Image (cartoon, rainbow, N blue to C red):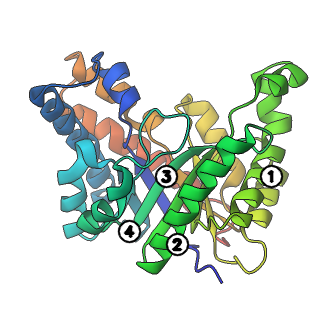
Amino acid sequence: MIDGYDKPLYVLPFDHRSSYIKGLFHWQSPLTAEQTAEIAASKFVIYEGFTKAVADGVPRDRAAILVDEQFGADILRDAGSRGYITCMSIEKSGSKEFEFEYGEDFEQHLEEFNPTFGKVLVRYNPEGDGRLNKRQEDRLSRLSEYLAKTKRLFMFELLVPPEKSQLERCGGQAVYDRELRPKLMIGAIRALQDAGVEPDVWKIEGLDLRQDCEKIVAVARRDGRAKVGCIVLGRGSDKQNVLRWLRTAAGMRGFIGFAVGRTTWWDAMAALRENKISRDEAIAQISTCFHEWVDVFEKAPTADR
């Protein structure tokens, strides 16, 4: 029996590393100590946007941060000491194949920071490379067992990138996302579960149709997994797309919230980086945006999740 997590969960992710370094700072790894410190300091601005949102009314027991150890170690410690729900990324950033960020030492790093959730981002197409999928399944089932044994929760961000043949079959990304990806997501969840990978929360790419959301919940909660939750991720998309995906899922049993990162803070952080706005203005913009996503779920027609 999988415990699962079925309480409302509103996550602000800023565990981005490769895209953050290159896209926001226009730097390349390896970083100097000064560059590393500057990136870590910038992530505190996002964290302060989160804490301001909670101070301004986002329910504290439903709000969570997702951040990486590399640039967010102090944030993880502070948030943990203040009783916030914390999620810590475990995967190596920018890798097409899931690998542990700290290799065989991943357990030690989880023990040190003791996050509420251990989180992974995984690219898994059930019609893709079978050997690749099997390697990922083996690592992920090991992680799943460890998190369950140590009484920590498991958050799984599932991305289903299209194979070239699938894109050709669909005639492009838009049709793939609308017509084929939902079916592949269901197949991926089922295959991962069968391989012993048992998340408490599935972090799901946005869906346009409510019936597809229902099918995702059905497979996520099959065979005794009745309390497993699903949350909507933002994919770095524009605000209108994110709002559409959130509204499609909000209020549905099984969809307990969201994890929207770049759409929440990228513009504010870019403007701050270019000295177009002040630190306080960036914090306020991030807070307001996060609060807007929360309102979609808090004001949904039904709270039955």
Q: Name the residue: 68% across, 67% down.
A: 254
Residue denoted by label 1: 187
Tell me which numbered mark, 1 or 2, is placed earlier along the sequence: 2
Residue 124 visible within the image: no
Spatial CA distance of label 1 from label 3 is: 19 Å
Q: At which x and y percent is residue 1? A: 66, 84
Spatial CA distance of label 1 from label 4 is: 28 Å
Residue 285 visible within the image: yes
Quadrant location of the C terminus in the rendered image? bottom right
As drawn, 143 above or below 123: below
Where disc 3 sits, the SS reads strand
Spatial CA distance of label 1 from label 2 is: 22 Å
Numbered badge on residue 234: none
Foreground mark, 1 or 4, reads: 1
Spatial CA distance of label 2 from label 3 is: 14 Å
Left/right placement of residue 49 relative to residue 157 reads left
Q: Which amino acid does label 4 sit on?
A: Thr
Left/right placement of residue 118 relative to residue 248 reads left
Q: Which amino acid does label 3 sit on?
A: Val
Residue denoted by label 2: 145
Tell me which numbered mark, 1 or 4, is placed earlier along the sequence: 4
Q: Which amino acid does label 2 sit on?
A: Glu
Tell me if mark 1 has few (under 14), some (14-19) or many (20+) residues whose alpha carbon lies within 10 angstroms of its own. Answer: some
Numbered badge on residue 120: 3
As drawn, 6 above or below 92: below
